[in-house]
Image (tube, rainbow, N blue to C red):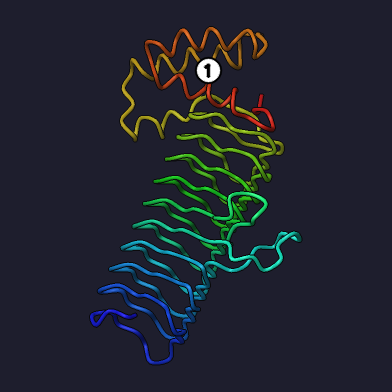
Amino acid sequence: MIHETAQIHPSAVIEDGVVIGANTTVGPFTYIAKDVVIGEGNEIMSHVVIKGPTTMGNENRVFAYAIIGEECQDKKYNGEPTRLEIGDRNVIRESVQIHRGTVQDKGVTIVGNDNLLCVNAHVAHDVVIGNHTHIGNNSILGGHVTVGDYAGVMALSAIHPFCTVGAYSYIGGCSAVVQDVPPYVLAQGNHASPFGLNLVGLQRNGFEKPELHALRRAYKELYRSGKTLAEVKPVLAEMAEEWPSVGRFLDAINNSERGIIR
């Protein structure tokens, strides 16, 4: 079903069963396959490919040659009807690839709201991207990666499968991330190492000085005290009673499958 206010270029190919909401535009030579549901106010430009099962929310902008909802590159994938879910107000730039999930994991790839995915970024199967993230040009999110809210993964960086990039963290360009990056941390290199807090990002997102001081103390406990993780955890737990944001450090340690960068 295509809403009467949607504008579809005559050269676009829309398969039967596609749902397109009000005031969405679809540019020339775009192909949208069955099992795709697109919300309201989206701008889908020329030469875009969208396959399903995929749902897309409202007010997203999808630039030329993006490939969304394609089957994944995992050798275990055998044609199962896995999904892709995209939220609202995302900007998906030229040649971005976002693949559906696999039944060996959640069966779904998820992109939240208000994210910027820059040119040729690759979002592999079963990735979960939160809200307000920045995924840079030619960056790679391997399968099963999680990127927290307000995190940045800069150009030409690669995130190893099953790694987590914590909320408000920042991965500098040309980095190779092979373990989890805790929240708030600035990391760079091959392999990526911690270089302090992402202070600029934290300040831009409303963190005040007292909280920043608490996060600095937590960072020093984790990275500069010489303590083991087992010794650091009770200290962080005590700090988190006053500053809940410190608890994210503790969660990163406790929930990590691959260990955190150190």
Which residue is rendered at x = 64% and y = 65% of the image?
Answer: 80
Q: How many marks?
A: 1
Give SS at disc 1: helix
- Residue 189: give x, y in percent of width and height: 66, 37
User: Which residue is the extreme one toward the left?
Assistant: 5
In the rendered structure, the answer to whether residue 93 lies left or right of residue 173 reads left
- The residue lying at 35 percent from left, 71 percent from top is 43
For the residue pair 118 and 181, the one nearer the viewer reads as 181
Tell which of 210 and 122 is nearer to you.
Answer: 122
Q: Percent x, y for residue 190?
A: 71, 39
Classify 88 as above or below 245: below
Amino acid under label 1?
A: Tyr
Q: Quadrant of residue 91?
A: bottom left
Choose between 199 and 227: the one closer to the eye.
Answer: 227
Of all residues, the one furthest to the bottom in this rendering is 10
Vertical comparison of 231 with 30: above or below? above
**In the rendering, at what x and y percent does residue 166 appear?**
52, 34
| Place of residue 56 in the rendered image (x, y in percent of width and height, measured from the top left) | 40, 64
Q: Residues within 10 Å of mark 1 (few under 14, many from 20)?
A: many
Pointer 1 residue: 219
Residue at (64, 57) in percent of width and height: 102
**Image quarter (top left, top right, bottom left or bottom right) of the C terminus:** top right
Q: Quadrant of the N terminus?
A: bottom left
Q: Is residue 129 above or below residue 261?
A: below
